[in-house]
Amino acid sequence: MRAQADPPLAPGRMKGPSDPLSPQDLQTLIRTGIPVANFMQLSVLDVRPDGVDLSAPLEPNLNVHGTLFGGSGAAMALVAAWSLAHTRLHSEGCEVPLVVVKQGMQYFKPVRSTVLARARFAQGQGWAPFVQALEQGQRARLGVVVELAPEPHPDEVAARLEATFAAAAAPGDPSRPQGTSGINSHRPRSASQP
């Protein structure tokens, strides 16, 4: 899937910090921008500056063994990872295209119930260097980790996704502020590529 980005903002128009996306706002964005999220019945439980939690019922995400289908788990984890990076960028007024450039999934045990996905930034991944690279018109990378767990046992990690996202502000874009986190070259309309 590929998002259609809005055209660049008018020169000189800079966006500062924005109100954070609510769980309902994020769920609407995911459900309208990622069609499979509707089929999977993804729900946003919580949105924080350092984490996003999603859930999905087992039934539309079953495999032939009556457990969570690996592809559904991977898709859910990737949506959770993208959601965390996107909501943090949004809350800081950074409206740049965000795409996954690397991801790996490990499965540890089957899930036989509603599944929870908890996204957080990878250890050692600083937010400030990511934003600084954007401010300098460079490609910035950010690591996110997502753990999947069965709802009845939220502390039992059933699978883990590690993903790296990239974002870039257009160099020389006059709407790109200098020295602030309000990057504003494009605003993605949808969660096209989590």
Image (tube, rainbow, N blue to C red):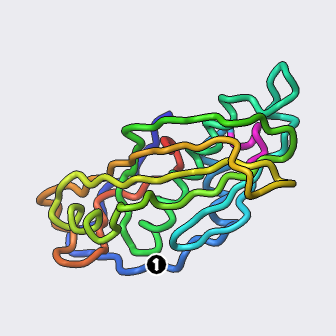
Q: Is residue 1 left or right of residue 76?
A: left
Q: Name the residue at 29% across, 74% down.
A: 181
Residue 151: % across, % down: 82, 53
- Which residue extends farthest left? 172
The span picked out in magenta is 37-42
Residue of label 1: 18
- For the stretch drawn in magenta, the main secondary structure is helix
> How many numbered markers are drawn?
1
Q: Name the residue at 39% across, 46% down.
A: 164
Q: Is residue 96 left or right of residue 44?
A: left
Q: Nearer the viewer, residue 169 or 124?
A: 124
Q: Is residue 100 left or right of residue 44?
A: left
Instruction: Count residues near mark 1 (Cα–Cα under 10 Å), then give few for <14, some for 14-19, many for 20+.
Output: some
Q: Nearer the viewer, residue 178 or 140?
A: 140
Q: Nearer the viewer, residue 51 or 32?
A: 51
Mark 1 falls on what kind of element? Answer: loop
* Residue 139 is covered by the magenta coloring: no
Residue 71: % across, % down: 65, 29
Q: Nearer the viewer, residue 6 or 27?
A: 27
Residue 161, by quadrant, is top right
Residue 9, by quadrant, is bottom left
Q: Is residue 100 left or right of residue 40?
A: left
Q: Name the residue at 52% across, 80% down.
A: 19
